[in-house]
Image: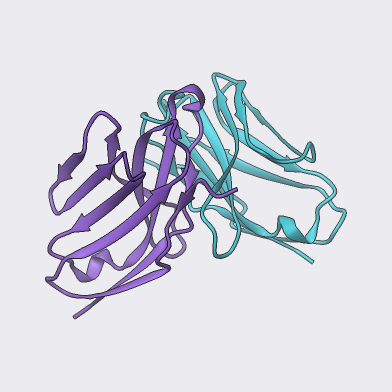
Chain colours: A purple, B cyan
Amino acid sequence: DQQVKQNSPSLSVQEGRISILNCDYTNSMFDYFLWYKKYPAEGPTFLISISSIKDKNEDGRFTVFLNKSAKHLSLHIVPSQPGDSAVYFCAASEFSNDYKLSFGAGTTVTVRA
Amino acid sequence: DAGVTQSPTHLIKTRGQHVTLRCSPISGHKSVSWYQQVLGQGPQFIFQYYEKEERGRGNFPDRFSARQFPNYSSELNVNALLLGDSALYLCASSGGSSSTDTQYFGPGTRLTVL
């Protein structure tokens, strides 16, 4: 069963504007969350992560927000650039099984010039 | 530095056959994980090996097996292939065995079962 859900399969945004990607999870034992980015014919590339003890983590243009009570996290990309066009996967893990990541189905982001 | 490499890139098999997929981790990485990505879905965890020992296994049948060699490279074997095994198989390596150790993915092997 899908414990990590990305309900928006696609997102189109104009260059320079903000991209907001959403992710929901059902497993309350998840305590570490990650975002990966994937270009065609390449493997996923780690983007940013957040531990459950935090509610925000920033790295350059990328910020991840975590709302534990709502079991929801989001990725903000500001400003969006054409090179950001890719598939973005949300992933999560729990301390007791920290060897494995549970992934969402992905959101395809298209940045329009 | 070379990233994670996987071979072959593409593979076509028929139902009932057996397949072996190979993965070479980043130099110095001791952990290798395997994921299956079916079209339209996210990667699903199959196995993790750390220091040549199986550390975790996902919800996959016994037809799936793997091993890790002394040089930390790994093989994923799938027996009695089914049409539903058609997928992109991803290998990831990391320095440690925890999910907080960044996992670096290879480009994957595209398996088609006819």
Give the image location of residue B48, x and y in percent.
Answer: 57, 30
State the image quarter where residue B56 is shown: top right
Q: Nearer the viewer, residue B9 or A52?
A: A52
Residue B63 vs residue B91: left or right?
A: right
Q: Residue furthest front?
A: A69
Q: Quadrant of the C terminus of chain B?
A: bottom right
Q: Residue at x 34, y 42 (%)?
A: A34
Give the image location of residue B95, x and y in percent.
Answer: 40, 26
Give the image location of residue A113, x and y in percent.
Answer: 18, 81
Q: Residue at x 18, y 41 (%)?
A: A56
Q: Nearer the viewer, residue A19 or A30?
A: A30
Give the image location of residue A55, x and y in percent.
Answer: 21, 38
State the image quarter where residue B62 is shown: top right
Picture layout, residue A20 above or below residue B18: below
Q: Nearer the viewer, residue A100 or B73?
A: A100
Q: Residue at x 41, y 37 (%)?
A: B103
Q: Quadrant of the N terminus of chain B?
A: top left
Q: Residue furthest bottom?
A: A113
Residue B40 vs residue A42: left or right?
A: right
Q: Residue furthest right?
A: B16
